[in-house]
Amino acid sequence: MKHTFIQGSDEKLPTLLLLHGTGGNEEDLIPLANMIAPGASILGVRGNVLENGMPRFFRRLAEGVFDEKDLVFRTKELHDTISDLASQYNIDRKNIVAIGYSNGANIAASMFYHYSNVLAGAILLHAMVPLRGMDLPNLSDTPIFIGAGKRDPLIPAAETKELSDELQNAGAEVTEYWTEGGHELRRDEVEQAKTWFDNRFRK
């Protein structure tokens, strides 16, 4: 998978895994990462699927309707890629925190649905339930921040609540933050994500 790696100045911080939204690339979320966790190393990855020329991490059949078979395949692909890149760049595989937006947040959530201890934590911005009818692995003490918009036209509030409940039922420590906006990222959401990160990962 196409990617970029930027060595940070603070080796104690987790490496940030950046997962873009539809039409983005491996560099899209670098400014966001620098706002949330200045000094952290950054690993940005580009999705391998194209939808009308726009990169995504997995296929969908329609707006909000995922190609579940492809999602399962791409989740494993991303999981294996992270492990390979961790070895390549001497990244502590157990100390990676994902920052995902929209499509990128969805595949990050999917990794939690499939793997235990896959990430040290995650910031899921405007995510949906990736798959239903699954027994989640043990996510005990995994900190997860979920950012959502009360007026998001793509993701109903009940969908975000369902995702939060599923992760909590698997043992994750979930923090929700709701903006008054829609599907866009808002400054207060980013500031809350930074506070959450500082409280959990800055020693």
Image: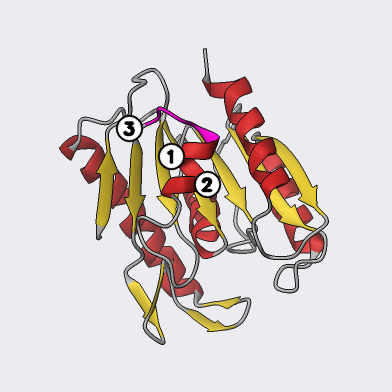
Magenta-drawn segment: 36-40
- Look at the image and tell me whether residue 112 can be seen: yes
Question: Compared with residue 150, is residue 154 higher up or lower down, i.e. above or below?
Answer: below
Residue 153, position as x, y percentages in the image: 75, 73
Residue drawn at x 42%, y 47% as measured from the top left: 30
Within 10 Å of disc 1 (Cα), the crowding (few <14, some 14-19, many 20+) is many
**Which residue reaches farthest left?**
88
The Cα–Cα distance between marks 1 and 3, rounded to whole angstroms, is 9 Å
Q: Amino acid at mark 1?
A: Val
Query: Sequence-wise, which precedes: disc 3 or disc 2?
Result: 3
Instruction: Identify the element where label 3 is drawn.
Output: loop
The Cα–Cα distance between marks 1 and 2, rounded to whole angstroms, is 7 Å
Within 10 Å of disc 2 (Cα), the crowding (few <14, some 14-19, many 20+) is many
Picture quadrant of residue 160 = bottom right
Disc 3 and disc 2 in contact, CB within 8 angstroms: no
Residue drawn at x 68%, y 53% as measured from the top left: 186
**Front tag of 3 and 2:** 3
Q: Amino acid at mark 2?
A: Phe
Within 10 Å of disc 3 (Cα), the crowding (few <14, some 14-19, many 20+) is some
Instruction: Identify the element where label 1 is drawn.
Output: loop
45 sits to left or right of 66 = left
Q: Amino acid at mark 3?
A: Arg
Q: Quadrant of the N terminus?
A: bottom left
| Closest to the observer, 155 or 181 | 181
169 sits to left or right of 68 = right
Query: Sequence-wise, which precedes: disc 1 or disc 2?
Result: 2
Disc 1 and disc 3 in contact, CB within 8 angstroms: no
Residue 15, position as x, y percentages in the image: 38, 33
* Numbered circle sitting on residue 112: 2
Disc 3 designates what residue?
93
